[in-house]
Every structure is written in structure tokens, then in C-alpha cells.
Image (cartoon, rainbow, N blue to C red):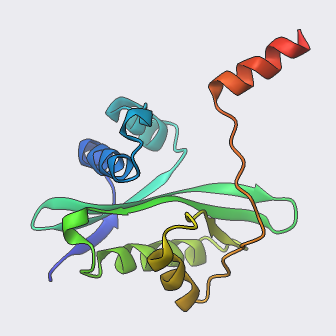
Amino acid sequence: MDYTIREARREDMPQVLELINELAAYENAADQVEITVEDLEEEGFYNHNFKCFVAEVKGKIEGMALVYYRFSTWKGRTVHLEDLIVRESMRGTGLGGALYQRVVKYAHENNVKRLEWVVSEGNKNAIQFYENTGADVKKNWYTVHMDESGIQENIEKEE
């Protein structure tokens, strides 16, 4: 299959949002996507809060990987892979692996001390893939989130 992995452009954001919505639907969370094309454009291309790579096949974006910098008190600057998404119809074609390798290359090019991401414990194929590439899947760590209502609740307790 002929494909191109490249940095996303502002005009790619509608297709990137399609992929985000497809992933959310796959995870039975379609109602939880709040981000808009405008948010992606502003945060990625004006505020420079993330870098996005896309996999393009015959002029259509079939996959994406979105990364941003974090800072570790132990390691220094790191890269966080927020999402790597390939359209369901294109899974198994090598696009995911190509996007993953582009992210690894980006981390290397930017001399970070660690590349990190979260994977669902139910995503056995991804876990096996990551382990086969030398990634250390931390099974004894928990991902912690606090949503807007939790933030607001904590602020109100302080007042």
C-alpha cells in the first residue's frame, strides 16, 4: 500500500476530528468528545500546544498521532503520545506502525528522555505491539483524571 506519513496541516483538522470521533465511537464514548475543529486549529497551529502526524492514503487521512511535550521531575522534557488512531477499515495495513515509528523518530529528533502514553488494559493487541518494540508497559501505575466538575468542586471547597 502506498501511503505518506507527514506533519498535519491546519486544513487537515476536520479529518483529524473525524478520526477522534471514530475512536470515541469505537470506545462507546461518542458523547464525550467536546473538542472542535476550531479548538484543534487554535491549540495546534496558533498556540503550538501539540504536534500531529497524519497517515495519508490516496489524498485521504486514514490515521493520526497527536503528541505534546511534558516535563518529568526525574527525566526532564518528555513527549506524550495522546492518541494514535487508524480508521477501522485501515487497521492491519501497517499505517499504525508507521505512525508509531514517526512518533519515536520525533522523540529522538527532539532529544527527549522519555516517550510515554497510556493504553487500555483491554487493548491486548496494542500492548503486545508496544512490548515487541521495547516499550515498558507499566502495569502497576494508574492513570488519574479529574474532569471539569471535579475541578469546580475542589475550587468551591477552597472558597
Q: Residue at x 87, y 15 (%)?
A: 157
Point 45% across, 43% down: residue: 44
Residue 36 point in image, percent of width and height: 36, 31
User: Image check: 59 left or right of 80?
Assistant: left
Q: Does 13 sit above or below residue 119? A: above
> Which of the 4 image quarters holds residue 97?
bottom left
Residue at the far top in the pictured view: 159
Can residue 9 be seen?
yes
Q: In this view, does 27 lie above or below 29?
A: below
- Can residue 35 be seen here? The reply is no
Could you say which is closer to the camera, residue 3 or residue 145? 145
**Which residue is rendered at x = 46% and y = 36% of the image?**
46
Q: In which quarter of the image is the N terminus?
A: bottom left
Does residue 126 appear to the left or right of 12 in the view shown? right
* Residue nearest the observer in this picture, 21 or 42: 21
Q: Which residue lies furthest to the left in this view?
A: 58
Residue visible at 78% across and 70% down in the picture: 140
Which image quarter is the C terminus in?
A: top right
Quadrant of res 65: bottom left
Q: Please state the horizontal and vertical placement of residue 64, each as a whole percent of the image.
A: 35, 60
Q: Position of residue 7 (x, y in %)?
A: 36, 61
